[in-house]
Image (cartoon, rainbow, N blue to C red):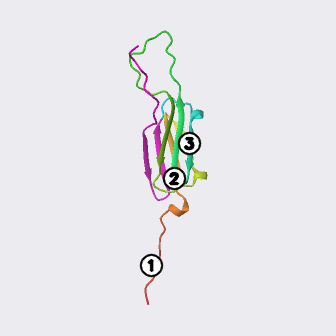
Amino acid sequence: NPFTPAAASGPPLNVWEDDHALYVEADLAGLDPAALDVTVTEGNQLTIQGERAAPDVTGAVWVRQERPVGRFTRAVTLPALVDADKVEAVYADGVLKLTLPKHEAAKPRKVQVRAGQ
């Protein structure tokens, strides 16, 4: 069989931020949300781990297999510290959506300027 399945790799990510939070979207079609593990360590290290089961094609011969299968890990350093206790993760329509509220120390602060004497 000249065909070799693609090795498992991490999902593509979109990451953006506003003054209050960082937001991450990961394409993870066909996964069981229970098989996902999302962690935040050191305040700004995001890791997404999971596993995509290989499809059962008993009695058939693969022609092309481009969707990765098996375990994967995707780790990224976030551009700001986040409050790990308040991270929200929702998986819908094959997309994992994370909301990572910024730690108070990372939020912009308005500084009042006083008139000099």
In this image, 32 relative to 66: left or right?
right
In percent of width and height, residue 97 lies at 50, 42
| The disc label shown at residue 113, or none | 1
Task: Check if mark 3's residue and mark 1's residue have beta carbons within 8 Å.
Answer: no
Q: Earlier in the sequence, mark 1 or mark 2?
A: 2
What stretch of residues is rendered in magenta?
Answer: 1-27
In percent of width and height, residue 45 lies at 51, 49
Question: As shown in the figure, which amino acid type bears the numbered disc 1?
Answer: Val
- Asked whether 94 or 28 is in front, the reply is 28
Task: Check if mark 1's residue and mark 2's residue have beta carbons within 8 Å.
Answer: no
**Could you say whether the residue bearing mark 3 is in a helix, strand or loop?**
strand
Residue 5 placement: quadrant: top left
Residue topped by disc 2: 44
Q: Earlier in the sequence, mark 3 or mark 1?
A: 3
Residue at mark 3 to residue at mark 1: CA–CA distance: 42 Å
Residue topped by disc 3: 38
Residue at mark 1 to residue at mark 2: CA–CA distance: 31 Å
Q: Earlier in the sequence, mark 2 or mark 3?
A: 3
Residue closest to the far top: 59
Please give the name of the residue rendered at 54% of the width and 31% of the height, measured from the top-left corner. 51
In percent of width and height, residue 10 lies at 46, 36
Please give the name of the residue rendered at 53% of the width and 55% of the height, measured from the top-left corner. 82
Circle 2 residues within 10 Å: few <14, some 14–19, many ≥20: some
In percent of width and height, residue 92 lies at 52, 36
In this image, 101 relative to 16: left or right?
right
Question: As shown in the figure, which amino acid type bears the numbered disc 3?
Answer: Val
**Residue 43 position (above or below residue 91):** below
Residue at mark 2 to residue at mark 3: CA–CA distance: 13 Å
**Could you say whether the residue bearing mark 2 is in a helix, strand or loop?**
loop
